Amino acid sequence: MKRSKVAYVMNGFPRLSETFIANEIHQLERLGLEMRLYSVKDEREPVVHPVVGAIRAPLTYLPEATSLSATTLRQWLRDNLGTFWAAHAEVARRRPLAWLATLGAAFGLAWKHRSREAGAPFALKKVFIKEFLQAGWIAQAVLRAGDVSHLHGHFCHGVATITWFASRLSGLPFSFTAHAKDIYQTELNPGRLLERKLGAARFVATCTCANAEVLRARHPRPDDVHAIYHGLDTDWFSPRVRLAREEAPLLLAVGRLVEKKGFDRLVDACALLRRRGVSFRCVIVGEEGSAGPALRAQIAGLGLAECVQLHAAVPQDRLREVYRGASVFALPCRVMEDGDRDGFPNVLAEAMAMGVPVVSTPISGIPEMIDDGVHGMLVDGSPESLAAAIELLLTEPQLHARLAGAARERICERFDSRQTTAALRDLFLRQLRASEQPPAAASSREATT
C-alpha cells in the first residue's frame, strides 16, 4: 500500500474556538491532500461549524484517559494502563528498539522535570508518561493503517510531544504548528523541551511572522520554521450592501470570554461612549470562559445591561450574518503576565474580509494584518483610546468607508486561504516525496535529539 496520507493530531476536534484548524483541513483536502485525523479528547460540542461536515478524512478519537492532576502516577497507571497496553505491546513487537528508546525518553523527561518541592522531592512529571501512552495508541493506528507517511500536530506543547513520541515509535517523520500561548508560556515546555521538539521535527509552521522570529531564535535549523497565516475563504466571507437601520449601530466583538481578549476594557470603553452620548449597542459573541462571570458583573455594575450584551458562540454561517450587521468590530487583546496571548486572531481577519472597520491592539501578529490608520485602527488598549477610536468610526462616514474598503483589500491580498494553505500543502508534499524511502529512515535525525 502506498503511503500518501498525513495524520493530523489534535487535542480536541472539532472545536468552535479552533475553527481555523477545521478550515485548514478542509482547504488541504480541496488542494488534493489525503489525511487521517486523530483527536486526543472526545469533546464534541453541540454547535459545530458547517465546514466540519465537508471534511472527508476519517476522524478517530483516542481512548479516554482519566485526569492526572488529582492522583498519583501509580494510581493513574493502574486506572489507565490497560486501555493503552495492547497498542504498546503491538508497537513493541513491531519496533522493539524504537519502543524502548521512546520509553526511556519519556521517563527521562518525567525524571528531569520532576517536582523538587518539599514533601515530594522525587515526584515524576506525570504528563510525559500519559503522553507516551497516548502516542503508542496513535503509532499503532498509523502502522496498522499502512497509508500514513507523515504526522502533524497542532500546538507545540502537549500534542506536539505526543506527535513526537508517536513519530519515534512508528518511524514516521513529524511536524507541528505552533500558535500562541503554547510558544510563550514556558511551563508548557519546561527546560529545553521545545528546542528538542523543534530539532526533531521535519518542519514547523506558525501563524505569524512574530511567532516565527521567536521560534527561529530557538531552532537549530531556523530555515525549517515557516510563517504561514491561517487564511480564510474570502469568497465566503464577503460583504454585502448594508441596509439603513433605525436601531443603534452595532459594535461587535467575538472571542472566548477569557482575560487575554480584553473584553473588560471594551466594556469600560462602552461606559465612556454612553457618557458622551454616542449611539451604539455592543454585542460580545463567544464561548463561556474564565472571565465570563466578571464581565457580567462589570456590565451590571456600570449599568450597561441595555446596551452591552454577551451572546453564546455561534457557527460560522450565523456569525457571518452577525458580521454583516456590524458597524465596527473591536478586539482589544492583551499579553498576560504568564505570556499567554493571541497569535493571529482569526475573527479580526473575518471582520476585515466582511468590510467591517476594526479596532485592536498592536500585539503579536495583529500589526501584520493591520497598518494603523490604513486597514483599521490600533490603540494602546486603554478604555479611553478604545472609546476614541470607536467614536471616530461611528461618527466619521468617510473614515469608516475608507478603512472598510482597505481592510477587505488587505485580507484578499495577503490572507486568502487558497494562497496560505497552498504553502502548507507544499511543505507536506515535500515530506511525502521524501518518505518514499523506507519509513525507518525518515526518523534518522532522532539519533541526535
Image: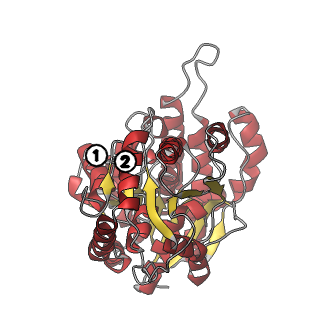
The answer to which of 130 and 170 lies nearer the viewer is: 130
How many callouts does the rendering have? 2
- In the visual, does 216 lie left or right of 32? left
- In the visual, does 278 lie left or right of 231? right
Q: Residue 437 appears at what percent x and percent y?
A: 34, 75
Q: At label 2, which amino acid type do we have?
A: Ala
Which dot marks residue 388? 2
Which dot marks residue 214? 1
Element type where label 1 sits in the image: helix
Colouring: secondary structure
Task: Note whether residue 380 is visible.
Answer: yes
Mark pair 2, 1: CA separation: 33 Å
First reached walking from the N terminus: tag 2 or tag 1: 1
Task: Note whether residue 34 is visible.
Answer: no
Element type where label 2 sits in the image: helix
- For residue 154, above or below residue 213: below
- For residue 200, above or below residue 396: above
Q: At label 1, which amino acid type do we have?
A: Val
Q: Residue 208 appears at what percent x and percent y?
A: 32, 57
Kindly identify the residue that appears in the image at 44 percent across and 55 percent down: 330
